[in-house]
Amino acid sequence: MMGNRNKRIFTVFIVFLCFQTLVRAQEFYAELESELQDKLNSIVQENQLPGVTFSLWLDESHHITLASGFSDTEEKIPMRPDSKMPAGSVGKIFFAAITLKLIQEDKLDLDDKVSFYLGDTDWYSTFPNHADIKIMNLLNHTSGLPRHLFQPEFLEDFIQDPKKKRAPLDCIQSIANKEAVHPVGQGWAYSDTNYILLGLIVEQITGRDFYDLIQEQILDSLDLNLTVPLQNNRIEGLAQGYVGPNNPFGLPKKVLDENGNMVLDPSFEWAGGGFVSNPKDLTQMVKFIHEGDYLNEDIKAKLKKAVSMSTGQAFDHGYGLGTFVWSKMNDTRYGHSGFFPGYVSHVEYSQNRQYALAIQVNDDGAYAYLQQFLYDLEQIIEGYLDRIDDHSIRENFKKQENCWNNSDIECYMEAYSKTDPIQTASRGGITYGYENIIGGYKKYFPKERMGKLYFDHINTRRLSANLYFVTGRFNLKFPDREELSQGWFSVNMKKINGEWYMITDHSS
């Protein structure tokens, strides 16, 4: 048996390795945050913006939220990382997610005719294309319905009294008896009207308030406490908004008056956007939609299936179901931009890198530049990806050590993929499949014999954005042996839903 002194040395060595790994991680994450803050400051200064908030969500343990500039330039109130702004059409992601969940539960179908739900009203038949529009056409904007917000009737009424409370159903009547933009499914035209109709249908099916559904199913489950429905003209923590030169709603320069109240009633937006939020919440939300189990894989595939924004036909990029789909940096992105008078927002999720980015600016004149701002910030992130991935992979092995040393095989096996085919190779041969592999561990390593484990000489090599080749050495001290049992291993690790998992494992 190993003497007490050697046991202490072994334990101290393991603790030292853990400490060194933690210190290195803290250092480079701090460096990344500092560089992103400097770039955000320069974006504000160079573009003469009032203020900006930004978030990068890598995984549950690593996310950065920053702010620069002013929440109110006249009062010199600094923008805070937790400042809120109306998110505009980014809110469509929330409304689309609830709708897709209903489709997943067979309570609604993409091929259902809208007239089945709204055909008995005294107004729906006055809408263009009313007989042919399906739920799918509402979600991906191929209905051909005009955008009610920019109809002369709506704008004239709004400019005359912006503080009047307007029910969304009343607002969309401005498209009654108007010409369709295009035949159903034979073109693409972005229209908030689509999502207002979707909201009416969802509430009819569920008998619930749409906001309550989102609160229960998304906001509460993720603890998104910086996101609130945009139903009132006073929201605590709201940054001042500045209206740019393109001002179709005839609003004053500042969106909040001297008492902190909006100079317009925002409730007309509803399912067309309808939320105040923050980049931290938006990045967490979009990661949840794409990586979580709220939606199944079949529905996620439908969500990401795009149509061309010119023809409305299936295409590799364009608009999916409540999300834009586009190419960027040899990657596919999913997300949405949003405009609300005085504010602009954007959130996106990286298919390959599997992180999320979001930005908000309290100046709606910045709308056209949001993608460029994010691109500049992402150039900094790219320089840290190898270190981020290396750290995450090493944390995976560190967790395995802890699980093994606590005699917990189920915990140890969490490092292996359950969704992709996996295999291990050792002196005993090749074992395929998760259940066979865990069964072998339990057979040959009963709890009383597992001993103590640590890994060293770990090296990582990137093969692609979501695949790494890793080599290292295992060191295993059995309770009934004096000497260490050592060997070398190589594994392929794949990033799946934001986490690294082993898909092959060869040891000797």
Image (cartoon, rainbow, N blue to C red):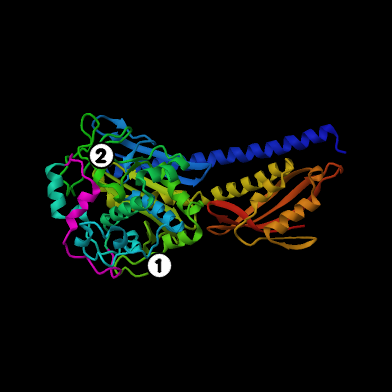
Amino acid type of the residue that numbered disc 1 sits on in the rendered structure: Asp
The spot of residue 480 in percent (x, y) is: 87, 42
The spot of residue 120 in percent (x, y) is: 26, 58
What is the span of residues highlighted in magenta in the rendered image? 162-188
Q: Is residue 235 above or below residue 309?
A: above
Mark 2 neighbour class, 10 Å CA radius: few under 14, some 14 to 19, many 20 or more: many
Amino acid type of the residue that numbered disc 2 sits on in the rendered structure: Gly
Question: Could you give the CA–CA distance between mark 2 and mark 1, rounded to whole angstroms?
Answer: 36 Å
Secondary structure at badge 2 equals loop
Answer yes or no: is residue 184 visible.
yes
Compared across the picture, whether 326 is left or right of 446 comes to left
Compared across the picture, whether 475 is left or right of 50 comes to right
Answer yes or no: is residue 372 visible.
no
Q: Which labelled disc corresponds to residue 15?
A: none
**Upstream in the sequence, badge 2 or badge 1?**
2
Quadrant housing residue 24: top right
Marks 2 & 1, CB-CB < 8 Å contact: no
Q: Which residue is mark 2?
A: 241
Q: Is residue 488 magenta?
A: no
Magenta segment's dominant SS is loop
Q: Quadrant of the N terminus?
A: top right
Q: Which residue is mark 1?
A: 316
